[in-house]
Amino acid sequence: MKQLTGHGKTPYSLQDTRDSPVDVLTLFRQLDLDPWDQVGLAKAFQLCSRLYKKETCWPVDRCPHIAFEGFNTGNKNALTYRGVAAGVLLLGLSGRFQESDDQVVTRISTCKSPQCFNPTHYYWGTKSQVAYETQLRNQKKLSIELIENLRNERQNGSSVLALSRKYKLAYHVARRICNGESYRNLGFSTQRSVANDEVWYLSTEICSLIVSRYPKIAKELNMAVRVADHLTCPWHHKGSPKHKGNFGLMGECLDCMEEMKKGRCTVDVRQFDLDWYWQVKRFWEQVDVKAQDQCWPWLGSTRRQNKESLAYFPSPFHSGKVQSAPRVALWLSRGYTGKYRVFSRTECVPFCCNPLHLTIRELKGCPAPTEIEAIHLKHDNVFQHYRETLQQVQSDSPIELSPS
Protein backbone atom coordinates (compact mmCIF):
# COMPACT_ATOMS: atom_id res chain seq x y z
CA MET A 1 0.00 0.00 0.00
CA LYS A 2 1.16 3.51 -0.82
CA GLN A 3 0.54 6.14 1.84
CA LEU A 4 -0.32 9.71 0.89
CA THR A 5 0.79 12.13 3.55
CA GLY A 6 0.70 15.89 3.96
CA HIS A 7 -1.52 18.77 4.99
CA GLY A 8 -1.11 17.72 8.64
CA LYS A 9 -3.98 15.24 8.42
CA THR A 10 -4.23 11.53 9.04
CA PRO A 11 -3.08 9.96 5.76
CA TYR A 12 -5.53 8.02 3.66
CA SER A 13 -4.53 4.92 1.73
CA LEU A 14 -4.13 4.87 -2.03
CA GLN A 15 -3.48 1.48 -3.58
CA ASP A 16 -0.42 1.47 -5.81
CA THR A 17 -0.41 -0.06 -9.29
CA ARG A 18 1.78 -2.97 -8.13
CA ASP A 19 -0.73 -4.02 -5.47
CA SER A 20 -4.07 -3.37 -7.12
CA PRO A 21 -5.25 -4.58 -10.55
CA VAL A 22 -7.43 -1.48 -10.84
CA ASP A 23 -6.14 1.97 -9.86
CA VAL A 24 -6.75 5.37 -11.35
CA LEU A 25 -3.98 5.10 -13.96
CA THR A 26 -5.17 1.65 -15.00
CA LEU A 27 -8.68 3.05 -15.24
CA PHE A 28 -7.48 5.85 -17.51
CA ARG A 29 -5.72 3.36 -19.77
CA GLN A 30 -8.83 1.20 -19.98
CA LEU A 31 -10.83 4.28 -20.99
CA ASP A 32 -8.27 5.25 -23.66
CA LEU A 33 -7.27 8.53 -22.00
CA ASP A 34 -3.80 9.54 -23.15
CA PRO A 35 -1.40 11.59 -20.97
CA TRP A 36 -2.74 14.86 -22.39
CA ASP A 37 -6.28 13.90 -21.38
CA GLN A 38 -5.14 12.79 -17.92
CA VAL A 39 -3.27 16.00 -17.18
CA GLY A 40 -6.14 18.06 -18.61
CA LEU A 41 -8.58 16.33 -16.28
CA ALA A 42 -6.31 16.91 -13.29
CA LYS A 43 -5.87 20.57 -14.23
CA ALA A 44 -9.63 21.00 -14.61
CA PHE A 45 -10.13 19.65 -11.09
CA GLN A 46 -7.46 21.97 -9.69
CA LEU A 47 -9.03 24.97 -11.42
CA CYS A 48 -12.52 24.08 -10.20
CA SER A 49 -11.25 23.75 -6.64
CA ARG A 50 -10.12 27.38 -6.89
CA LEU A 51 -13.18 28.68 -8.75
CA TYR A 52 -15.87 27.09 -6.55
CA LYS A 53 -16.53 26.30 -2.92
CA LYS A 54 -16.33 22.67 -1.83
CA GLU A 55 -19.94 22.49 -0.71
CA THR A 56 -21.41 23.86 -3.95
CA CYS A 57 -21.91 22.45 -7.43
CA TRP A 58 -19.11 22.81 -9.97
CA PRO A 59 -20.93 23.52 -13.28
CA VAL A 60 -18.29 22.93 -15.94
CA ASP A 61 -20.57 24.32 -18.65
CA ARG A 62 -20.03 27.79 -17.17
CA CYS A 63 -16.21 27.64 -17.17
CA PRO A 64 -14.61 29.49 -20.12
CA HIS A 65 -11.01 28.42 -19.43
CA ILE A 66 -9.09 26.45 -22.06
CA ALA A 67 -8.46 23.67 -19.52
CA PHE A 68 -12.13 22.64 -19.87
CA GLU A 69 -12.10 22.17 -23.65
CA GLY A 70 -12.14 18.36 -23.28
CA PHE A 71 -15.58 18.40 -21.68
CA ASN A 72 -18.78 17.91 -23.65
CA THR A 73 -21.74 19.79 -22.19
CA GLY A 74 -24.06 19.23 -25.15
CA ASN A 75 -26.14 16.73 -23.19
CA LYS A 76 -28.00 18.72 -20.54
CA ASN A 77 -28.50 15.61 -18.41
CA ALA A 78 -24.90 14.35 -18.24
CA LEU A 79 -21.31 15.56 -18.35
CA THR A 80 -18.66 13.71 -20.35
CA TYR A 81 -14.93 14.12 -20.77
CA ARG A 82 -13.39 12.79 -23.98
CA GLY A 83 -16.45 10.61 -24.44
CA VAL A 84 -16.33 9.16 -20.92
CA ALA A 85 -18.87 9.86 -18.19
CA ALA A 86 -17.32 12.47 -15.91
CA GLY A 87 -18.75 10.75 -12.83
CA VAL A 88 -16.66 7.63 -13.50
CA LEU A 89 -13.50 9.73 -13.77
CA LEU A 90 -14.28 11.73 -10.64
CA LEU A 91 -14.84 8.57 -8.64
CA GLY A 92 -11.53 7.23 -9.92
CA LEU A 93 -9.74 10.45 -9.01
CA SER A 94 -10.91 10.01 -5.42
CA GLY A 95 -9.88 6.34 -5.23
CA ARG A 96 -13.42 4.93 -5.52
CA PHE A 97 -13.87 2.15 -8.07
CA GLN A 98 -16.75 -0.04 -9.19
CA GLU A 99 -16.92 -3.16 -7.01
CA SER A 100 -19.74 -5.04 -8.77
CA ASP A 101 -21.51 -4.99 -12.12
CA ASP A 102 -24.78 -3.77 -10.63
CA GLN A 103 -23.19 -0.53 -9.43
CA VAL A 104 -23.74 2.62 -11.50
CA VAL A 105 -22.67 6.24 -11.10
CA THR A 106 -25.17 8.02 -8.87
CA ARG A 107 -25.50 11.75 -8.30
CA ILE A 108 -26.72 12.92 -4.91
CA SER A 109 -30.11 14.59 -4.74
CA THR A 110 -28.77 17.90 -3.40
CA CYS A 111 -26.66 18.39 -6.54
CA LYS A 112 -28.38 21.01 -8.68
CA SER A 113 -26.43 20.70 -11.93
CA PRO A 114 -26.17 17.63 -14.21
CA GLN A 115 -22.93 19.25 -15.49
CA CYS A 116 -21.46 19.20 -11.97
CA PHE A 117 -17.78 18.25 -11.52
CA ASN A 118 -17.73 18.12 -7.72
CA PRO A 119 -16.41 14.65 -6.67
CA THR A 120 -18.41 14.59 -3.43
CA HIS A 121 -21.64 14.73 -5.45
CA TYR A 122 -21.11 11.26 -6.94
CA TYR A 123 -20.95 7.73 -5.56
CA TRP A 124 -21.29 4.14 -6.76
CA GLY A 125 -24.85 2.97 -6.21
CA THR A 126 -27.53 0.67 -7.55
CA LYS A 127 -30.37 1.50 -9.93
CA SER A 128 -32.68 1.70 -6.93
CA GLN A 129 -30.43 4.35 -5.43
CA VAL A 130 -30.45 6.30 -8.69
CA ALA A 131 -34.25 6.21 -8.69
CA TYR A 132 -34.34 7.27 -5.05
CA GLU A 133 -31.98 10.21 -5.60
CA THR A 134 -33.99 11.28 -8.65
CA GLN A 135 -37.27 11.19 -6.78
CA LEU A 136 -35.70 12.92 -3.80
CA ARG A 137 -34.47 15.65 -6.12
CA ASN A 138 -37.95 16.10 -7.64
CA GLN A 139 -40.00 15.33 -4.55
CA LYS A 140 -38.48 17.34 -1.74
CA LYS A 141 -40.53 15.53 0.95
CA LEU A 142 -39.49 12.01 -0.07
CA SER A 143 -37.37 10.22 2.54
CA ILE A 144 -36.57 6.75 3.87
CA GLU A 145 -39.01 7.30 6.74
CA LEU A 146 -41.78 8.27 4.31
CA ILE A 147 -41.16 5.15 2.20
CA GLU A 148 -41.44 2.94 5.28
CA ASN A 149 -44.65 4.69 6.36
CA LEU A 150 -46.20 4.21 2.93
CA ARG A 151 -45.49 0.50 2.90
CA ASN A 152 -46.62 -0.08 6.48
CA GLU A 153 -49.90 1.79 5.99
CA ARG A 154 -50.50 -0.01 2.71
CA GLN A 155 -50.11 -3.37 4.49
CA ASN A 156 -52.61 -2.19 7.10
CA GLY A 157 -55.25 -1.68 4.41
CA SER A 158 -54.88 1.95 3.28
CA SER A 159 -55.45 2.54 -0.43
CA VAL A 160 -52.70 3.88 -2.69
CA LEU A 161 -54.90 6.81 -3.70
CA ALA A 162 -55.46 7.81 -0.08
CA LEU A 163 -51.75 7.51 0.67
CA SER A 164 -50.77 9.60 -2.36
CA ARG A 165 -53.15 12.34 -1.25
CA LYS A 166 -52.07 12.13 2.38
CA TYR A 167 -48.35 12.45 1.64
CA LYS A 168 -48.84 14.67 -1.46
CA LEU A 169 -47.10 12.31 -3.87
CA ALA A 170 -47.88 11.44 -7.45
CA TYR A 171 -50.10 8.37 -7.61
CA HIS A 172 -47.68 6.33 -9.75
CA VAL A 173 -44.83 7.11 -7.34
CA ALA A 174 -46.86 5.99 -4.32
CA ARG A 175 -48.01 2.84 -6.15
CA ARG A 176 -44.46 1.80 -7.10
CA ILE A 177 -43.23 2.34 -3.55
CA CYS A 178 -46.09 0.36 -2.02
CA ASN A 179 -45.63 -2.50 -4.52
CA GLY A 180 -41.91 -2.67 -3.84
CA GLU A 181 -41.04 -1.83 -7.45
CA SER A 182 -38.54 0.82 -6.35
CA TYR A 183 -36.33 1.53 -3.36
CA ARG A 184 -36.13 -2.11 -2.30
CA ASN A 185 -33.07 -1.65 -0.08
CA LEU A 186 -33.88 1.04 2.43
CA GLY A 187 -30.48 0.83 4.12
CA PHE A 188 -28.55 2.15 1.15
CA SER A 189 -28.49 5.75 2.38
CA THR A 190 -25.53 4.92 4.60
CA GLN A 191 -23.55 3.28 1.80
CA ARG A 192 -22.52 6.60 0.23
CA SER A 193 -21.45 8.20 3.51
CA VAL A 194 -17.79 8.43 2.50
CA ALA A 195 -16.07 11.19 4.44
CA ASN A 196 -15.83 14.29 2.29
CA ASP A 197 -12.43 15.07 3.80
CA GLU A 198 -11.16 11.76 2.47
CA VAL A 199 -12.60 12.45 -0.99
CA TRP A 200 -11.02 15.91 -1.13
CA TYR A 201 -7.68 14.66 0.14
CA LEU A 202 -7.40 11.73 -2.27
CA SER A 203 -8.64 13.75 -5.25
CA THR A 204 -6.11 16.50 -4.59
CA GLU A 205 -3.23 14.08 -4.10
CA ILE A 206 -4.06 11.94 -7.13
CA CYS A 207 -4.32 15.02 -9.36
CA SER A 208 -0.94 16.21 -8.06
CA LEU A 209 0.56 12.80 -8.82
CA ILE A 210 -0.81 12.87 -12.37
CA VAL A 211 0.54 16.36 -13.00
CA SER A 212 3.97 15.46 -11.62
CA ARG A 213 4.03 12.31 -13.73
CA TYR A 214 3.89 14.37 -16.97
CA PRO A 215 5.70 17.65 -16.19
CA LYS A 216 6.20 18.70 -19.83
CA ILE A 217 2.50 18.36 -20.68
CA ALA A 218 1.55 20.11 -17.45
CA LYS A 219 3.82 23.02 -18.35
CA GLU A 220 2.23 23.44 -21.78
CA LEU A 221 -1.26 23.29 -20.31
CA ASN A 222 -0.26 25.87 -17.73
CA MET A 223 0.80 28.17 -20.56
CA ALA A 224 -2.56 27.65 -22.29
CA VAL A 225 -4.48 28.48 -19.11
CA ARG A 226 -2.24 31.49 -18.53
CA VAL A 227 -3.10 32.80 -21.99
CA ALA A 228 -6.80 32.42 -21.17
CA ASP A 229 -6.31 34.27 -17.88
CA HIS A 230 -4.69 37.22 -19.66
CA LEU A 231 -7.21 37.73 -22.44
CA THR A 232 -8.55 41.22 -22.89
CA CYS A 233 -12.00 42.55 -23.63
CA PRO A 234 -12.72 45.28 -26.27
CA TRP A 235 -12.64 48.01 -23.60
CA HIS A 236 -9.01 47.32 -22.71
CA HIS A 237 -6.34 49.95 -23.46
CA LYS A 238 -2.69 49.04 -23.88
CA GLY A 239 -0.74 49.53 -20.68
CA SER A 240 -3.84 49.51 -18.50
CA PRO A 241 -4.47 46.69 -15.98
CA LYS A 242 -8.25 46.96 -16.39
CA HIS A 243 -10.36 44.79 -18.70
CA LYS A 244 -7.58 42.20 -18.86
CA GLY A 245 -7.66 38.63 -17.53
CA ASN A 246 -10.57 39.43 -15.22
CA PHE A 247 -13.45 37.32 -16.53
CA GLY A 248 -16.37 35.55 -14.90
CA LEU A 249 -17.67 32.04 -15.47
CA MET A 250 -19.68 33.11 -18.53
CA GLY A 251 -16.72 34.94 -20.04
CA GLU A 252 -18.04 38.34 -18.99
CA CYS A 253 -15.49 41.06 -18.21
CA LEU A 254 -15.85 41.76 -14.50
CA ASP A 255 -14.46 45.27 -14.93
CA CYS A 256 -17.19 45.98 -17.48
CA MET A 257 -19.78 44.54 -15.10
CA GLU A 258 -18.78 47.08 -12.47
CA GLU A 259 -19.18 49.88 -15.02
CA MET A 260 -22.58 48.50 -16.04
CA LYS A 261 -23.74 48.58 -12.41
CA LYS A 262 -22.89 52.28 -12.39
CA GLY A 263 -25.14 52.79 -15.41
CA ARG A 264 -22.56 53.14 -18.17
CA CYS A 265 -24.22 53.46 -21.57
CA THR A 266 -22.39 55.23 -24.37
CA VAL A 267 -22.03 54.92 -28.14
CA ASP A 268 -18.58 56.43 -28.43
CA VAL A 269 -15.84 55.09 -30.71
CA ARG A 270 -13.34 57.23 -28.79
CA GLN A 271 -13.64 54.94 -25.78
CA PHE A 272 -11.74 52.13 -27.50
CA ASP A 273 -8.10 51.41 -28.20
CA LEU A 274 -6.73 51.93 -31.69
CA ASP A 275 -6.67 48.15 -32.29
CA TRP A 276 -10.43 48.00 -31.79
CA TYR A 277 -11.39 51.40 -33.22
CA TRP A 278 -11.89 50.33 -36.83
CA GLN A 279 -14.08 47.32 -35.92
CA VAL A 280 -16.17 49.43 -33.55
CA LYS A 281 -16.55 52.18 -36.17
CA ARG A 282 -17.49 49.67 -38.88
CA PHE A 283 -20.16 48.09 -36.65
CA TRP A 284 -21.94 51.36 -35.84
CA GLU A 285 -21.83 52.34 -39.52
CA GLN A 286 -24.15 49.37 -40.15
CA VAL A 287 -26.68 50.56 -37.55
CA ASP A 288 -29.34 53.16 -38.30
CA VAL A 289 -28.75 55.34 -35.23
CA LYS A 290 -31.89 57.32 -34.46
CA ALA A 291 -33.31 59.09 -31.41
CA GLN A 292 -32.88 57.46 -28.00
CA ASP A 293 -36.56 56.58 -27.73
CA GLN A 294 -36.64 54.88 -31.14
CA CYS A 295 -35.41 51.51 -32.37
CA TRP A 296 -32.06 51.37 -34.14
CA PRO A 297 -32.46 48.89 -37.04
CA TRP A 298 -29.56 46.70 -38.16
CA LEU A 299 -28.58 47.43 -41.77
CA GLY A 300 -25.84 44.79 -42.06
CA SER A 301 -25.77 41.14 -43.08
CA THR A 302 -28.41 38.58 -42.18
CA ARG A 303 -28.99 34.91 -42.87
CA ARG A 304 -31.67 32.20 -42.72
CA GLN A 305 -34.16 34.35 -44.60
CA ASN A 306 -33.49 37.41 -42.44
CA LYS A 307 -34.10 35.52 -39.20
CA GLU A 308 -30.55 36.02 -37.84
CA SER A 309 -28.23 39.03 -37.92
CA LEU A 310 -24.50 38.71 -38.60
CA ALA A 311 -22.01 41.21 -37.20
CA TYR A 312 -18.28 40.53 -37.59
CA PHE A 313 -16.76 40.89 -34.15
CA PRO A 314 -14.27 38.28 -32.84
CA SER A 315 -14.67 37.37 -29.20
CA PRO A 316 -12.15 35.61 -26.91
CA PHE A 317 -14.87 33.29 -25.62
CA HIS A 318 -16.67 32.41 -28.86
CA SER A 319 -15.41 30.02 -31.49
CA GLY A 320 -17.07 31.94 -34.33
CA LYS A 321 -16.03 35.40 -35.50
CA VAL A 322 -19.57 36.68 -36.05
CA GLN A 323 -22.16 37.53 -33.41
CA SER A 324 -25.72 38.77 -33.41
CA ALA A 325 -25.95 42.52 -33.93
CA PRO A 326 -27.83 43.24 -30.64
CA ARG A 327 -25.17 41.36 -28.67
CA VAL A 328 -22.35 43.40 -30.21
CA ALA A 329 -24.34 46.61 -29.70
CA LEU A 330 -24.58 45.88 -25.98
CA TRP A 331 -20.88 44.96 -25.81
CA LEU A 332 -19.86 48.27 -27.40
CA SER A 333 -22.24 50.50 -25.45
CA ARG A 334 -22.47 49.06 -21.94
CA GLY A 335 -19.78 46.40 -21.55
CA TYR A 336 -18.48 43.04 -22.64
CA THR A 337 -20.84 40.35 -21.31
CA GLY A 338 -19.33 37.24 -22.90
CA LYS A 339 -21.68 34.32 -23.44
CA TYR A 340 -24.73 35.90 -21.84
CA ARG A 341 -27.70 36.09 -24.22
CA VAL A 342 -28.96 39.54 -25.15
CA PHE A 343 -32.67 40.27 -25.58
CA SER A 344 -34.51 43.26 -27.03
CA ARG A 345 -38.00 44.48 -26.18
CA THR A 346 -40.96 42.59 -27.57
CA GLU A 347 -42.17 45.67 -29.44
CA CYS A 348 -38.76 46.35 -31.05
CA VAL A 349 -38.03 45.96 -34.73
CA PRO A 350 -35.97 42.86 -35.65
CA PHE A 351 -32.31 43.13 -34.57
CA CYS A 352 -32.79 46.42 -32.75
CA CYS A 353 -29.40 47.80 -31.62
CA ASN A 354 -30.54 50.63 -29.35
CA PRO A 355 -28.66 50.00 -26.05
CA LEU A 356 -31.62 51.26 -24.04
CA HIS A 357 -33.76 48.48 -25.55
CA LEU A 358 -31.31 45.64 -24.79
CA THR A 359 -31.24 43.54 -21.63
CA ILE A 360 -29.68 40.38 -20.18
CA ARG A 361 -32.29 38.54 -18.15
CA GLU A 362 -29.80 36.59 -16.02
CA LEU A 363 -28.12 39.74 -14.68
CA LYS A 364 -30.10 40.93 -11.69
CA GLY A 365 -27.60 43.42 -10.27
CA CYS A 366 -27.22 45.63 -13.35
CA PRO A 367 -29.90 48.35 -13.55
CA ALA A 368 -31.10 49.39 -16.98
CA PRO A 369 -29.65 52.77 -18.06
CA THR A 370 -32.04 55.66 -18.39
CA GLU A 371 -30.17 57.45 -21.18
CA ILE A 372 -27.21 57.20 -23.51
CA GLU A 373 -24.48 59.43 -22.13
CA ALA A 374 -22.85 60.28 -25.46
CA ILE A 375 -22.98 59.36 -29.14
CA HIS A 376 -19.75 59.84 -31.08
CA LEU A 377 -19.38 57.75 -34.21
CA LYS A 378 -16.03 59.08 -35.46
CA HIS A 379 -12.75 60.67 -34.37
CA ASP A 380 -11.43 64.05 -35.45
CA ASN A 381 -7.92 62.63 -35.26
CA VAL A 382 -7.83 59.01 -34.13
CA PHE A 383 -4.04 58.83 -33.96
CA GLN A 384 -3.74 61.93 -31.81
CA HIS A 385 -6.42 60.53 -29.53
CA TYR A 386 -4.50 57.24 -29.30
CA ARG A 387 -1.29 59.00 -28.26
CA GLU A 388 -3.10 61.07 -25.63
CA THR A 389 -4.87 58.02 -24.24
CA LEU A 390 -1.61 56.04 -24.06
CA GLN A 391 0.10 58.88 -22.19
CA GLN A 392 -2.81 59.07 -19.75
CA VAL A 393 -2.76 55.31 -19.13
CA GLN A 394 1.00 55.33 -18.53
CA SER A 395 0.73 58.22 -16.08
CA ASP A 396 -2.02 56.41 -14.16
CA SER A 397 -0.07 53.13 -13.95
CA PRO A 398 1.64 52.40 -10.62
CA ILE A 399 5.42 52.79 -10.55
CA GLU A 400 7.29 49.54 -9.99
CA LEU A 401 10.31 49.92 -7.73
CA SER A 402 13.28 47.74 -8.57
CA PRO A 403 14.90 45.95 -5.62
CA SER A 404 17.98 47.70 -4.28
Image (spheres, rainbow, N blue to C red):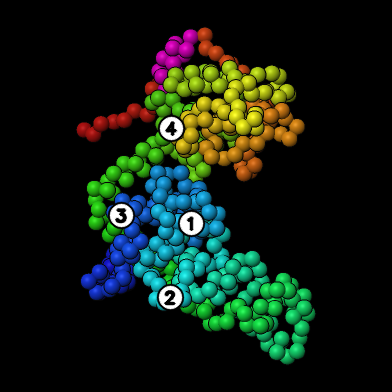
* Residue that appears at 46% across and 37% down: 319
Please identify, in this view, whether the residue under mark 3 or under mark 4 is nearer the observer.
Answer: 3
Residue 126 at what x, y percent from top left? 50, 75
Disc 1 designates what residue?
79
* Residue that appears at 53% across and 73% down: 127
Residues in magenta, as a range? 381-393
Disc 3 designates what residue?
34
Earlier-in-chain disc, 1 versus 2: 1
How crowded pointer 2 is (Cα within 10 Å; few <14, some 14-19, many 20+) is rated as: few
Disc 4 designates what residue?
232
Earlier-in-chain disc, 2 versus 3: 3
Q: Mark 4: which amino acid?
A: Thr
Identity of the residue furthest to the bottom in this view? 156
Q: Are marks 1 and 4 in contact (CB under 8 Å)?
A: no
* Residue that appears at 44% across and 19% down: 274
Q: Which of the 4 image quarters holds residue 267?
A: top right
Earlier-in-chain disc, 2 versus 4: 2
Locate residue 375 relative to residue 84 in the image: left or right: right
